[in-house]
Image (cartoon, rainbow, N blue to C red):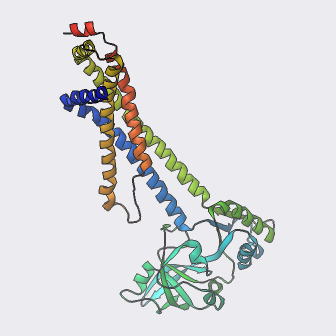
C-alpha cells in the first residue's frame, strides 16, 4: 500500500512540475471526449426528434389512394368509398380507427374579400388518425356527419384572416355556395408544409357535404390506424388485399405506411452517428499520439531520476506503473473536462432550440467517452512506460 501511495505521489508531482505541458497534452483528449459525448447526444436527440415528427403526422398510419393512369379513364367502380372504409374497420384485424377524406379548392367570402382555401371533407375519426390539435371549440362528431350538418373547422391562419380579434366559434363562414357554422379551430400537431390535405388555409366539413361540391361521394384518401407498430406491415398487406377484392382487377391502389420513412430516418441518423463518431475517435487518436510523444520526451528528460529510483530499489513494475499512471491521469482528467464541457453546451444552446426539442446527455455517451479516452491514454502511454522501466540503473546514472 505504501508503494502504491508513493507511486501516486511521484506521478502527481511529476505532472505538477510540468503542469503547462501536461495541460496542453490533455487538450486533445478534451476535444476528443467532448466530440464523442456531443456526437452521441446529438445523434440520439436528433433521431428521437425526427421519429417524433414523423409519428406526429399519425402514429401507426396506413393510407391508400387510387393510382390514376392518364391513359385509362377512371370508372366509378374503381373509386374508394365509405363502404371500403367500413369494410377495413370491420374486416382487418388490428385496426383501431379509420377515416376518409376528399379535397377540393374553394373560396371563402369575408366581407368584400375572397380567399382561396383548401376544402376537405372528413369523417369523424380523422382527428384521431391525423393527431390534429383542437385549439378552440370541438371536432366533428358522428351526428354532424350522419345529419350532414353545415358545420366546419378552420385552421388558425384562416381564423385570423376571417375573424380578426373576435372569437370565431359560432360565427358563419361562406365557403363557395354554402354557409357553415364554425365549431372549431385546429392545427396539425406536426407541420407537413402543405404535403398533406391540410394547408395553411383549410376548411374541414362533414364528408357527405362534399357531394354538393363534387357531385359524388368517393374517397380521395383512405386512412387506417393499426393498434401497434408491429401490426403496421400486416395491416398494410391486408388493406391492399381488401381493396383488390372489392374492386375490378383493372384498378390499382397505392397502399403505403410511414414505416419506410421511419426506417430511412433511422438509417440516416445511424450513418451520421457513425461518421461523427469516427471523427471523434480520430481526435482521440491524435491526442493519444500526443500523449505518447510527450511521455517519450518525459522519459528522456527523467532518465537520471529513473536511474536513482532503480538504484535505491525501485522495481521494473513500479516504474512501469508510475508512467502508465501519469498517462492515465492526463487522459482521465482530459476526458472528465471534455465531458463537463459537452454537458454544458446543450444547456447553453437550449434558448436557441425549438420549444419541443430536448437534448439530454445520455449516460451511455459519458461512459463511452471516459472509457475510450482513458484506454487511449493507457494504450499510447505503455510504450514510453515500458521504455522507462527497461532503463539500466548504471546507464541512467551516467546520463548527462
Q: Position of residue 157 (x, y in %)?
A: 43, 78
Q: Position of residue 158 (x, y in %)?
A: 45, 81
57 on left or right of 354 = right
For the image, the number of numbered tags is 0
Is residue 69 or residue 202 the one in the foreground?
202
Note whether 372 is above or below 113 in the view shown: above
Position of the N terminus by quadrant: top left
Q: Is residue 143 above or below residue 7?
A: below
Residue 299: image quadrant is top left
User: What residue is shown at x 41% (from left), y 87% (from top)?
Assistant: 163
- The foreground one among 336 and 343 is 336
8 relative position to 241: left or right: left
Depth check, front residue: 291 or 302 = 302
> Which residue is at 40% across, 27% downward?
379
Q: Is residue 19 above or below residue 255?
A: above
Counting from the top left corner in percent of width and height, residue 137 is at: 48, 86
Amino acid at each position: 500500500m505504501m508503494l502504491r501511495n508513493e507511486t501516486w505521489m511521484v506521478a502527481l508531482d511529476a505532472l505538477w512540475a510540468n503542469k503547462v505541458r501536461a495541460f496542453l497534452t490533455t487538450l486533445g483528449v478534451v476535444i476528443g471526449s467532448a466530440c464523442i459525448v456531443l456526437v452521441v447526444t446529438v445523434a440520439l436527440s436528433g433521431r428521437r426528434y425526427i421519429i417524433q415528427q414523423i409519428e406526429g403526422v399519425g402514429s401507426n398510419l396506413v393510407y391508400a389512394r387510387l393510382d390514376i393512369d392518364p391513359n385509362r379513364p377512371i370508372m366509378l367502380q374503381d373509386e374508394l368509398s365509405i363502404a371500403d372504409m367500413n369494410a377495413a374497420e370491420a374486416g382487418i384485424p388490428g385496426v383501431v380507427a379509420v377515416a376518409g377524406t376528399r379535397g377540393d379548392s374553394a373560396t371563402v367570402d369575408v366581407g368584400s374579400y375572397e380567399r382561396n382555401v383548401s376544402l376537405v371533407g372528413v369523417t369523424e375519426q380523422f382527428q384521431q388518425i391525423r393527431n390534429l390539435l383542437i385549439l378552440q371549440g370541438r371536432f366533428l362528431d358522428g351526428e354532424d356527419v350522419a345529419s350532414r350538418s353545415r358545420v366546419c373547422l378552420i385552421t388558425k391562419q384562416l381564423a385570423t384572416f376571417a375573424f380578426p380579434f373576435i372569437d370565431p366559434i359560432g360565427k358563419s363562414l361562406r365557403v363557395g355556395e354554402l354557409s357553415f357554422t364554425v365549431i372549431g379551430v385546429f392545427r396539425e400537431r406536426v407541420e407537413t408544409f402543405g404535403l398533406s390535405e391540410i394547408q395553411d388555409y383549410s376548411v374541414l366539413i362533414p364528408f357527405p357535404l362534399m357531394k354538393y361540391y363534387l357531385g359524388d361521394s368517393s374517397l380521395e384518401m383512405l386512412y387506417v390506424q393499426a393498434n401497434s407498430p408491429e401490426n403496421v406491415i400486416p395491416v398494410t398487406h391486408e388493406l391492399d388485399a381488401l381493396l383488390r377484392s372489392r374492386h375490378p382487377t383493372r384498378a390499382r391502389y397505392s397502399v403505403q405506411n410511414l414505416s419506410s420513412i421511419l426506417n430511412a430516418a433511422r438509417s440516416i441518423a445511424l450513418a451520421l452517428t457513425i461518421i461523427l463518431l469516427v471523427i471523434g475517435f480520430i481526435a482521440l487518436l491524435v491526442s493519444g499520439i500526443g500523449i505518447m510523444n510527450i511521455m517519450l520526451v518525459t522519459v528522456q528528460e527523467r532518465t537520471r531520476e529513473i536511474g536513482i529510483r532503480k538504484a535505491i530499489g525501485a522495481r521494473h513494475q513500479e516504474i512501469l506503473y508510475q508512467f502508465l499512471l501519469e498517462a492515465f491521469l492526463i487522459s482521465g482528467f482530459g476526458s472528465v473536462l471534455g465531458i463537463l464541457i459537452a454537458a454544458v453546451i446543450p444547456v447553453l444552446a437550449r434558448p436557441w432550440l425549438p420549444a419541443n426539442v430536448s437534448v439530454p446527455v445520455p449516460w451511455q455517451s459519458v461512459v463511452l467517452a471516459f472509457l475510450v479516452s482513458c484506454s487511449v491514454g493507457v494504450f499510447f502511454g505503455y510504450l514510453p512506460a515500458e521504455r522507462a522501466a527497461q532503463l539500466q540503473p548504471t546507464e541512467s546514472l551516467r546520463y548527462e
